[in-house]
Amino acid sequence: MNEDSSVEKSKKKEDRNPVCVGREDDIKKLRRTTVVIHDREVVVFYHDGRFYALDCRCYHTGGPLHEGDIEDINGQPCIICPWHKYKITLATGEGLYQAINPREPSPKPKWQSKGVKQRTHRVTVDSGNVYVTLSDTDDNIESDHYANIHNRIILPPKKK
């Protein structure tokens, strides 16, 4: 094992330690907050008595999820991306869409899953502090493309 790979493994292990992102009462009042954890933009939501953490930028085109509305879809709380209205479950990061079965006599749209598109992270509360532990899965998830603050494209302000 060379020195670079041991440093990389150590950094990965460090990235998986819980990081304090704020006081429980403060986040409950705000309902959401954005933080940077090990160069990754994360949004923490408090909704219906539960904390959730996801990559802050939508998997589709990097829309700011912290500015989206939360809606209940099929019994699941979902964040709605303000840019293109993509629906993402807070608990699992699944992308949802409505589809119909044309073979049904009177087709009605039903919610379907696209699979996990948005990386979710573990949230714990201890002694009045909220902690986020970055996801430990090594699977490539579509939101990874926009999550690292060094890979984000900053658009210049529009000219009037």
Image: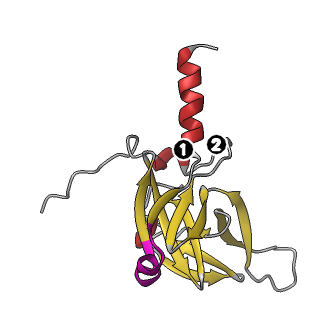
- Given the current orientation, which residue lies at the most extreme left position? 160
Magenta stretch contains residue 26: yes
75 relative to 141 in the view: left or right: right
Residue at image position (62%, 51%) is: 135
Q: Which residues are magenta?
A: 22-32
Residue 56 visible in the picture: no
Q: Quadrant of residue 125?
A: bottom right
Q: Which mark is on residue 25?
A: none
Q: Which mark is on residue 15?
A: 1
Residue 86 visible in the picture: yes
Instruction: Tell which of 90 and 84 is nearer to you.
Output: 90
Q: State the count of labels.
A: 2
How far apart marks 1 and 2 lie (CA) works out to: 16 Å
Residue 144 versus residue 79 in the image, above or below: above
Q: In the image, residue 111 lies at what x, y percent? A: 72, 75
How would you rate the neighbour count of disc 2 (Cα within 10 Å): few for under 14, some for 14-19, many for 20 or more? few
125 relative to 149 in the view: left or right: right
Label 1: element kind: helix
Q: In the image, residue 24 lies at what x, y percent? A: 48, 76
- Given the current orientation, which residue lies at the most extreme top position? 2
Residue type at numbered disc 1: Asp
Q: Main secondary structure of the magenta part?
A: helix
Label 2: element kind: loop
Of callouts 1 and 2, the N-terminal one: 1
Q: In front of the other: label 1 or label 2?
A: 1
How would you rate the neighbour count of disc 1 (Cα within 10 Å): few for under 14, some for 14-19, many for 20 or more? some
Which residue in the structure is indicated by mark 2? 140
Q: In the image, residue 44 lies at what x, y percent? A: 49, 68
Q: Quadrant of residue 79?
A: bottom right
Instruction: Tell which of 138 and 114 is nearer to you.
Output: 138
